[in-house]
Image (cartoon, rainbow, N blue to C red):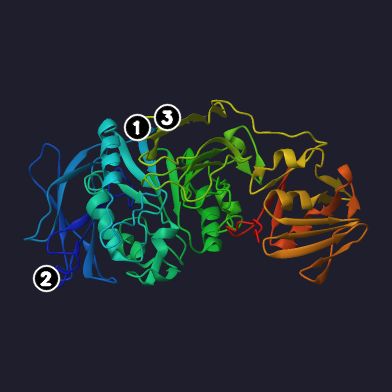
Amino acid sequence: MINGKPPRGSGLFPDHIMISINSDARYNMTVTWRTDKSVETGFVLSRKDGETESKRTDSDNSFFKSDIDESYIHWAHIKNLEPGTKYYYTCGDETHRSDEFYFTTEPENCEKFKFLAISDQQKGEPHDAPDYSIFNSFMLDVLKKNPDIAFILSAGDNTDCGQHEVQWNGMFATGAKGFAEYKPYMMAEGNHDTRGFKDYDKGIGRYYSEPAEFFCNQLRGSYNYDGPDSCKTENYTFDYGNVHFNVFGVNFPEDVNEWLKKDIPSSDKTWKVGVYHFPIAYSGSDCQNNDGFPIMKDGTELEDIIFSGHEHSFARSFPYRDYQLFDRPSEGTVNYVLGDTGDNPPGTLSLEKVWHCSWYPNEEKGKLMACLVEVDRKKMTLTSFLSDGTIVDKCVIDKEKDEIIPNRAAPIFNKNKTRYMYKGADIGLASMDVYAEKKDNVWYLPFAVLAQTIGGKVIKEKGKVTVDVNNHVGVFTENSASALADGKEKELEGKVYRGSKGQLYIPASACSIFGMTYTYAERNNFLSFEHPDEIKPITVQP
């Protein structure tokens, strides 16, 4: 402690300074900063480039008691600005002023601009003073090479453990400093931003907050306060040029879905872009999308593109709608997983899934990733690149021509050979000549083949198969319309029968015995099985 304050604690002079889009970016800009609790008010002095006279904007002020500090968060909403104009500003009170920074408002009738999309920049070490300097260096280099970037969009996990102020202190002091004061920093909430520990020092008692206390207290006045009533700060909208952005958090998915269904159709912008931390078209071998999807399916499928993070690897999906894969942007939502912007290689095995048209594991240390997005009327060019300059993926989504370049057709499988996947991964050779079949409007497959391939235990006997996977056991008997599920009889949708290669074909809905669900992609002709937990169904070697 220094004078009763933790390292990087609040002081008399402003810190945690950032600008953001709270309303119309042509005429308004919001400045956020923090001070010690003894500095209860503040104001911004702003002036147009080339002028000497400054305008005063008083701040809204909110007292915040965190786990280690007591401070005031200040938000000044600078209004009546001129479009496409550079302004200089300082923030603070009468005696404690910041350095002078600048920002540029959105041009009038803007249909051509750039923004930078990032994700998962969190750093947890050192534990008492997280160091984001590698992220900061990367960002400053990107902005130096692309000074015309209009704003920065983060898909979440801005901190490693956002329920503790030491994490945000590290992010602002060593991560965002040098660019958040100049470029609007539009952050989505990630699961790490909601995470806390009852004992942070010992890492004991992990929990996830609903809502995320510090995220909301820090940013409540920074962003448009227009989300669902249950979680306004965690969900907000903003417009820039001809794009409408929905930024949504990781809590209360039912409320978020209703909000999206009302908000998106009400916008007349050319592009509808969502930002959601958890990928819908994920790449992790043991990941899942049940945190918010399919609860938010109706709302999210109204977006043209959704930027996500969480997995620390890159993936871009085919246009995706109603569990089916398409070719044209008008036919579905492109789910775009941004990769790792914090030098945090993925902790799970990343795989190319059936829904991906482009994929990259991003597993090398020191190779940070970001995406430069260039909007040009009805075209959007997305270039994901590594810190060494390597281009991982580049595509153009063209609304006018209704195409995505480079062209890649979504897979359509033989109508007589219905494939089956687990978490989007084709089990390939194991399922040769033992495809799924539909009889009397019921889907069947040799479920033992699927279970064995993903690491389950299978015992095959004459006329009977026992499947042990995901900590559940099912026993299926030929010609029987019931099974033993963890020792209890369970009715099936149809009778088990002997099919191709002599395998026992079991109704696909029997997957519920093992905690699974399934969907059928009619256009592409495959079944996809999901499990809601990141469970690794591998048998134990005695």
Dot 2 amino acid type? Asn
The image quadrant that residue 236 belongs to is bottom left
- What residue sits 57% from the left and 45% below the top? 281
- As helix, strand or loop, the secondary structure at mark 3 comes to strand
Query: What is the CA distance from the residue labelled 1 to the residue labelled 3?
Result: 9 Å
The answer to the question of whether label 1 and label 3 lie on touching residues, with beta carbons closer than 8 A, is no
The image quadrant that residue 296 belongs to is bottom right
Q: Is residue 207 above or below residue 45?
A: below
- The outermost residue toward the right is 479
The answer to whether residue 522 is visible is no
Residue 388 numbered tag: 1
- As helix, strand or loop, the secondary structure at mark 1 comes to loop
**Residue at image mark 3:** 391
Q: Nearer the viewer, residue 260 or 452?
A: 452
**Residue at image mark 2:** 3
- As helix, strand or loop, the secondary structure at mark 2 comes to loop
Dot 1 amino acid type? Asp
The answer to the question of whether label 2 and label 1 lie on touching residues, with beta carbons closer than 8 A, is no
Q: Residues within 10 Å of mark 1 (few under 14, many from 20)?
A: few
Q: Quadrant of the C terminus?
A: bottom right
- What residue sits 53% from the left and 61% below the top? 253
Residue 444 drawn at (x, y percent):
83, 50
User: In the displayed structure, does residue 357 sit left or right of residue 528?
Assistant: left
Dot 3 amino acid type? Ile
Q: Nearer the viewer, mark 2 or mark 1?
A: 1
- What residue sits 85% from the left and 46% below the top? 438
- The outermost residue toward the front is 542
Residue 143 drawn at (x, y percent):
28, 36
Q: Nearer the viewer, mark 1 or mark 3?
A: 1
Q: Residues within 10 Å of mark 3 (few under 14, many from 20)?
A: few
